[in-house]
Amino acid sequence: MSTAPRPRIITIAFWLTMVGAVLLLAGGILGITTSLTTPVSAFPASMGQGQAHRILLMHGGVGAVLALAGLGLSFLAGRTRNGDKRFRRALAALAGVVVFLVFVIALFAPYNLELLTLIGVVPVAIGATLFTRPPAADWFEDAS
């Protein structure tokens, strides 16, 4: 860890990432809960029971992946805040994957993502970007 004081941009990036991670976690848990409690009879009769069941299963699986991504982002943000460059790179990579995944799912999935998930990727993307800004990068270089 660096002896230099932590720049304000690191604190802002940390809290933005944490807010986004909590929103992703909440959206993922909401997706799991929705898929478990929605009856197959809620789907149109023209859609077979098997297809409705697969959609619910996929919705729950995506919710679980997003909840795990939220947990992973919060862990990486905490380690990054302490000045470890490796975790900063991992955080930036995971944030990029999550933003891309949510974008692709929002475009192509046969169901809607939870609003919390869609809102949650915005602070994650901003926070991960702030961690890579020059003042933050200089602090990480001094920390190693």
Image (cartoon, grey):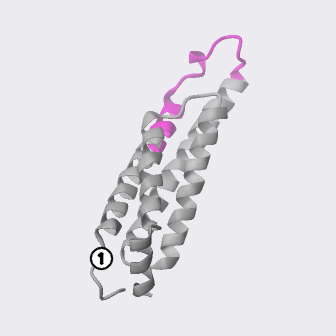
Q: Residues within 10 Å of mark 1 (few under 14, many from 20)?
A: some
Q: State the image coordinates of residue 18 (x, y, percent, origin top left).
A: 37, 57
Q: Secondary structure at mark 1?
A: loop
User: Is the stretch drawn in magenta largely helix, strand or loop?
Assistant: helix
Quadrant assignment for the C terminus: bottom left
Of all residues, the one furthest to the front in this rendering is 134
Q: Which residues are magenta?
A: 28-49
Residue 46 is inside the magenta segment:
yes
Residue sitting at x 57%, y 63%: 93
Instruction: Give 116 or 140, whichever is nearer the viewer.
Output: 140
Q: State the image coordinates of residue 82 (x, y, percent, origin top left).
A: 36, 77
Which amino acid, mark 1?
Answer: Arg
Residue sitting at x 37%, y 62%: 13
Instruction: Give 95 or 41, whichever is nearer the viewer.
Output: 95
Residue sitting at x 55%, y 22%: 39
Residue 40: quarter of image: top right
Quadrant assignment for the N terminus: bottom left
Could you tell whether 89 is left or right of 3 in the image?
A: right
Q: State the image coordinates of residue 56 (x, y, percent, origin top left).
A: 61, 31
Residue 102 is inside the magenta segment:
no
Q: State the image coordinates of residue 36 (x, y, percent, origin top left).
A: 52, 33
Count of numbered tags = 1
Residue sitting at x 48%, y 71%: 88
Residue 77: quarter of image: bottom left
Could you tell whether 63 is left or right of 131 in the image?
A: right
Name the residue that disc number 1 marks.
Answer: 6
